[in-house]
Image (cartoon, coloured by chain):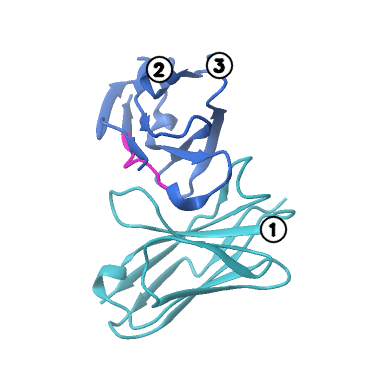
Chain colours: A blue, B cyan
Amino acid sequence: AQKVTQAQTEISVVEKEDVTLDCVYETRDTTYYLFWYKQPPSGELVFLIRRNSFDEQNEISGRYSWNFQKSTSSFNFTITASQVVDSAVYFCRPMNYGGSQGNLIFGKGTKLSVKP
Amino acid sequence: DAGVTQSPTHLIKTRGQQVTLRCSPKSGHDTVSWYQQALGQGPQFIFQYYEEEERQRGNFPDRFSGHQYPNYSSELNVNALLLGDSALYLCASSLAMEIYGYTFGSGTRLTVV
């Protein structure tokens, strides 16, 4: 069975601090995708990034960076120089390569509060 | 380019009633998925429609049913509403089984009293 864990329920930082959100995905599958989504207070889930299990290169997009380590099944997300607009709930979710929806699960999310 | 449109935005129903929620997918998307999100929780997968057929289903009772039309729009129907059905219902559209990431709507907030 697959399991995705976001151990941090809530994180509070002050603006301009760096913050890392953790995600651990446990599976027997050797090939899969991992996604990060952002859900601001408006409720709409926004797709941030998709990585596949073959690609362990870190990716940077502006203030966002992602670190995937297959050996530890972790797919962590770092926001550099956080801003108040980053305040949201962030979800990690997996999907296997075949597109099978049997493991259509989201993590429970990490609520990030960035204070001015 | 319009994204995913859901209606209504908010809805209040009485226990035992039936409700229909609607979703128009993003232009160019052919797959629609529905999720239920209780307060403080991650979204839970209800079902997914492709080519007007239910392709996958999560662990939800038969009271939850859906439909997809030829124009790819979709409906979620819930019969015999329970208080526990109160949640944010999210519709997500995608192309080819979400390989490229869902586009989510803003959701319908359903309150059952």
Tag 3 subunit: A
The percent coordinates of residue A93 (x first, y second) are: 44, 39
Helix, strand or loop at label 3? It is strand
Numbered tag placed on residue A60 in the rendering: 3
Circle 2 is placed at which residue position? A71
The image shows residue B100 at horizontal and vertical percentages of: 63, 40
In the rendered image, the quadrant that contains the C terminus of chain B is: bottom left
Q: Secondary structure at mark 1?
A: loop
> For residue B70, which quarter of the picture?
bottom right
User: For residue A43: magenta?
Assistant: no
Q: Nearer the viewer, mark 3 or mark 2?
A: 2
Residue A54 appears left or right of B20: right
Range of magenta residues: A105-111
Q: Which mark is residue B30?
A: 1
Name the amino acid, label 2.
Answer: Ser
Q: Is residue A6 left or right of residue A47?
A: left
**Element under disc 2:** helix
Residue at point 28%, 49% (across, down): B40
Marks 3/2: CA–CA distance: 21 Å
Q: Which chain contains the residue that carries disc 2?
A: A
B31 relative to A64 in the view: left or right? right
